[in-house]
Image (cartoon, helix red, strand yellow):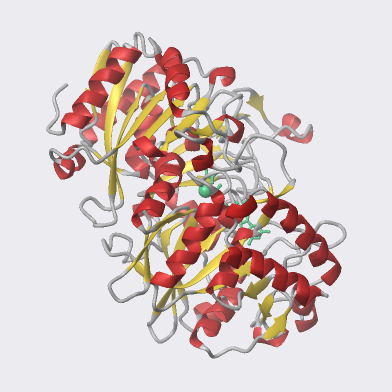
Amino acid sequence: MNFLSKGVEKFVNESAELCQPSKVVLIDGSEEQLEALRAEAVQTGEMIKLNQEILPGCYLHRTKPNDVARVEGRTFICTEKQETAGPTNNWIQKDEAYKILSDIYRGSMKDRTMYVIPYSMGAVGSPFSKIGIELTDSIYVVLNMAIMTRVGQKVLDQLGTSDDFVKGLHSKADVDPEKRYICQFPEDNTIMSVNSAYGGNVLLGKKCFALRIASYQGWKEGWMAEHMLILGLEKPNGETKYIAAAFPSACGKTNLAMLIPPEEFAKKGYKIHTVGDDIAWIRVGKDGRLYAINPENGFFGVAPGTNVKSNPNALASTRKNTIFTNVCHNLENNTVWWEGLDKNPPKKAIDWQGQPWGPEQQAQGVKGAHPNSRFTAPTANCPCLSDQFENPEGVPLDAIIFGGRRAKTAPLVYEARNWNHGVFVGSIMASETTAAASGAVGVVRRDPMAMLPFCGYHMADYFAHWIEMGKKVSHQPKIFNVNWFRTDEEGHFLWPGFGDNMRVLDWIIRRCEGTAEAVETPIGFVPKPEDINLNGLNMTTKDVADLLTVDKKLWLEDADNIEEFYKKFGDKLPKELRAELDTLKNNLK
Ligand code: GTP
Ligand code: SPV
Ligand code: MN
């Protein structure tokens, strides 16, 4: 194949030589080509066409049961030296990785087509945007990438003769979990993913590029790639404040990004506008403020728990032109269902593993949808999409929020004393693991800035980069930490969450404007309980006070655990963070 960019040409031709596909096809981005691929995928059984009256343009796909989530244990940062990848990443020396991988890729696309997907992360031509080329033997990947990113000829036109693009080679090969590798080569702008066909492992624009490779690029080039949603909060006076928030996988980013304010706020004129639900690229603007874009063009959202009450905007986003993965197939009307969609599960269905499913299986506790089943929906479907979504300059950030899933310890919300303390707060984030990655669920682990699985270089260098970025901005966003997941002794959530999280955002914005008070605690500032607006909620100021308590005993334990965690970084840990930990310990005395 011929390309204007000689780098693209070389990459495509060498990869084809290695993988030996029977055919190489360029994805031009046209609807005709995508429609033909959908028809082919339906014909081969790779996708099921759903009821086109109820769900126009929607399809269902099931992955292999061994291939349903990101695989952190098989994800590697491949660099010249291990020091570059640091203590929190799996590492393979890069030449060795290329050797291991080329043996697995050799002939892996025999009798298959290799699709060439030119894609842009960010609006085509925006100064923030970056281009990638993903080669894949999966139609499912092509169709998902066409929703999640901007694809096609227009991207090649933008690239022109330049070789400045990220190479991504994906082959599902035999979907063999023993030979599954998700490898990032940040020094070479290269991603190699093999033996998986699931989400974050294979839609290479997402976690592999927009976080792992981009975080490294950001470190070298002076910007940031973060696992953050971006939302605009419009106030009754028409002014919009922008907030970016980092929560670990399956901890509420999509839900917060699409929040519908409770009636109390809605009737006053508060609105939330979604800019992004998973990834933010952040730069310093000409005015010295931080500006963020969402580099994606779609939502790869968690299906279970999404319903008209919890997240009507997400649900509405999935009503057309959406690909569902590993949800339950409702045979009554050829639609989809998942746990938490409604109280009316289908009587006749096929579960995510392809087995018959109905009331009997449900009674036995068999799930219809996998806990990490997902929808891939175009951002354009979102009823509350921000009119700034395509703004090539991004949106200015007023606040940054960190948060995790913690039954105890972390209060509902607290505010960092300043930027460096905020970086410390992000660095000590901890959260219970979820079904978004394979492995045990519900185990508390340290997940700094929700980037543990996604930082493409040494985490201590990443912390230092955060501190440096703070020095480059003249107007630093305030930094907060939230926890929607505190529970009582029986494990019930103490905070209603979802739309009611607006009540916490309201305090956060008022803090940014200097119009709300706070109480200083050893860990930072918490609201005065009466400053959280509870109108319309069946909760008392005392309940909120309980949610805001800072239990010294638990925090002392946490401080010891942070000390342990920080030991991993040795001398490389920025002295500013060391000092913050000492301050915390002192404050707790
Ligand atoms: P990824 O796409 O994996 O990055 O996940 P995410 O961070 O976007 O999480 P998402 O919004 O999809 O929510 C994941 C799960 O958390 C769902 O089951 C939600 O129902 C639940 N959840 C989200 N927000 C809240 C909340 O405020 N309170 C409670 N209790 N649960 C929530
Ligand atoms: C996450 O796990 O954070 C996701 C889903 O957003 S995946 O694309 O699989 O990474
Ligand atoms: Mn995510």
Q: Residue at x 13, y 24 (%)?
A: 2
Give left or right: position of 560 versus 462.
right
Residue 311 appears in view:
no
Residue 408 appears in view:
yes
- Which percent across, then down, holds residue 158? 16, 45
Is the N terminus in the top left, top right, bottom left or bottom right quadrant?
top left
In the image, residue 115 sits, relative to residue 297, either above or below, namely above
Q: Residue at x 56, y 23 (%)?
A: 64
- Which percent across, then down, holds residue 287? 30, 76
In the image, residue 270 sits, relative to residue 126, either above or below, namely below
- Which percent across, then down, holds residue 404? 65, 58
- Viewer-proximal residue among 547 and 192: 192
- Which percent across, then down, holds residue 318? 45, 47
| Residue 39 occupies quadrant | top left
Q: Residue at x 38, y 38 (%)?
A: 187
- Viewer-proximal residue among 33 and 527: 527
Give left or right: position of 317 versus 350.
left
Is the C terminus in the top left, top right, bottom left or bottom right quadrant?
bottom right
